[in-house]
Image: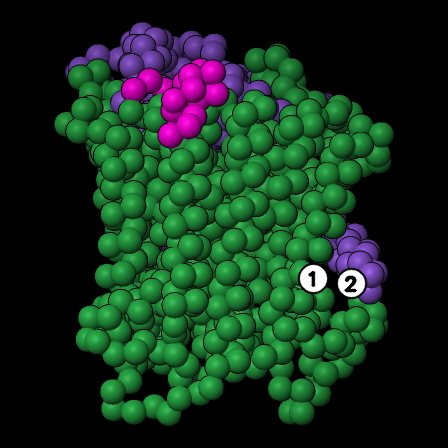
Chain colours: A purple, B green
Amino acid sequence: MRSIIASIRLVIVTMLICVVGYTAFIWGVARAFAPESAQGSLVKSADGKIVGSALIAQKFAQPRYFWPRPSAVDYKADAAGGSNKSPTSPELIDRAKTIIAQYDASPANPLPPELAAASGGGLDPHITEHAAFYQASRVAKARGLSQAQVEAIIREHAFALGGFFTSDRLVNVLDLNLALDALNGLK
Amino acid sequence: MNPIPFSALIVLGTALLSWPLGRYMKWAMDPDLSRNPAANRFDQLFHRFGGRFCVTQQNWKQYVISMLLFNVFMFSVSFGLMAFQQRLPLNPDGKGPINIDCIFNTAASFMTNTNLQHYSGEVSMSYLSQLGALMWLQFVSAATGIAALAAMARGLSGRKQMGNFFLDLQRATFLVLLPIAIVVASLMVFGGMPMTFLGAAKATTLEGVSQTIARGPVAAFLTIKQLGTNGGGFFGPNCAHPFENPTFWTNILASVSIILIPMACVWMFGRIIGRMRHSAVVFAVMFVFLLGKITGAVWFEQAPTQAFDRLPIEQTVGNLEGKELRFGTAAGPLWAALTTCTSNGSVNAMHDSLNPMTGLMAMIGMWLNTTFGGVGVGMINMFLYVVLAVFLAGMMVGRTPEIFGRQIEAREVKLAVIALFAHAFFVLAPTGLFAAIPAWGARTLNNPGPHGFSEMLYEFSSANANNGSGFEGLGDNTVPWNIATGVVMMLARFIPIILPLAIAGSLAIKRKTAQSAGTLGVEDGTFGVMLFGTILFFGALTFFPVAALGPIAEHLQFMR
């Protein structure tokens, strides 16, 4: 009996401190020091409309935009997930063939691997700088820009993922496409 | 950066950090009250929180009963919160009711520190369910493990009274987990992780399509899930979701958080029993196993995605299916090894899409479940192997086996062997059952052939190791899966806590024998090798056949 009372008291105390107190404190830290990212790093257009999140991939299928990595959940950001297919699965071969046709890849011009492999959460916002260059001629043609202009934008937005420690360079696809739209808007 | 030194740096750095933390945990969990006025004041506060019953000293049986009783409350309260979530507040996206077998599975899963998830967080759970039911259990279930280890250590140091569960639970929650969680969660917030009570954001993409972006109080939840070897994701894809792991740096911080407290538990154990050399030997054995599994995972994952062979796709980097780019190439397999060696179970890459032999490395982690293991319980599991190794060594040289100055007799060895065989049985028997009944097993699979078998094997290995990761292609939100894994998780949680406590209780009342030249030590390299061999042979003999049917068969069949 006494241990039942002790259990109930501990349920209440741990709830109050670990759920209410701890959560409120971290929420306060977030509100004070990182209000933008705390709400999901939302990206807004010039007229204040939410166009997406800097951390979340969105679907791009038009030739004038850079395309993100494939998503097993069709970029649904309220039901994320991966393909969960074994790397030996025949279904991956079929999916890759569709993608190869979209990019018009060939043995002379092979596709960068991340453009054929679905990301873990289906929402990976990045592609490598290399995969962006791979798409540059298509984007340039669709927008009436020179390839050099598009490549300059890629270089401007590429970053080393771990700063000083890493050599791989990534670009954020939404970031890149917003920059392209801004450039076209100026013309 | 080259993946091997990258991984080694993270693991070595964390090992260094675990030393001072282990010292602190001894200070917090088993204070010498005469020389520790601060802990004394905390204890008085905890007495006030928990009532007078917290002062009573308990023997091992009373301690176990209190632990089980509190776990019943943990289960019931979280079950109730989830069952009525549609009528309770903090539900901005209007999540509806969850089916009852899934609630049973989830409550069992989070109570047992497993965090196997047959639901998808952002689809099914309200913020109140996430925080009040699940995150709460992430604190107190981890604290239960640390408390049990402290009690076992007290018994092994010769005390018949093992402390008081209600007091130990508060010490572990408020003095160990909470302060570290506050620091790490704040860093995660600075790293760009969401922490909001607003509902999902509605966006209109550049191509004019609408996108609903689920978010929530992620940073608080994520941190304790890593520190307490819980591993349950706020979102379905766990730490592969950009909101649960936004950058290269949050990924490193999370990797460190996964193994920090399990490592420190080994040192805490050594300090309580007063035998740091024994802890050092155990730590070294665990560390060798951990490094072996990391090296294997990183190595096998360097093979490119096999399905893309012969297609016009570059084969220059490793397998990228199910991985995120922002963590770098080594981060997926490193994490896969860390999360399964400890009983964490969070993932930053989809384990179902790992190369077959990398998936095997993850399964080995769960089969052994002692190479650091879950907070508290990892060291408790290791103690079972220590007993077995001492017994075997004694048999080999024809001496009466003893540990920490007390004789190991039939009763102790029996208990240890029962616990170890229960571990093997609850992986193999249900996997066989589900493989035999197509309606339960085969029809829920996402991949054909040996990989499909691996999906079932992984699920029960994970439930049994209280790990919680999965080959998530498995359609596991069905009544048979929910009930079977729920029951396995509970048996696999409590049997390996109760039996070692019984061993400690039985050793504590034995007369201490004097150390002589004939005593087999447990504090030197010879014993380390013996322990290493015991674990290796026990694991290999038990699990090699199923490994051959699943991942090894797939590797030999497909990988070139």
Residue name at image x 62 percent, y 66 percent: B61
Q: Amino acid at mark 1?
A: Ser
The answer to whether residue B474 is visible is yes
Picture coordinates of residue A120, whole percent (x, y): 44, 31
* Rendered view: A25 above or below B362: below
Q: Secondary structure at mark 1?
A: helix
Q: Which residue is mark 2?
A: A3
Can you say whether B507 is above or below A165 in the image? below
Near-viewer residue (A41 or B305):
B305
Residue B513 horizontal side relative to residue A78, left or right: left
Q: Specify the segment rendered in magenta.
A: B432-449
Chain of the residue on which disc 2 is drawn: A
Q: Residue furthest front?
A: B410
Q: Is residue B227 left or right of residue A104?
A: right
The subunit carrying tag 1 is B
Q: Is residue B363 left or right of residue A174?
A: left
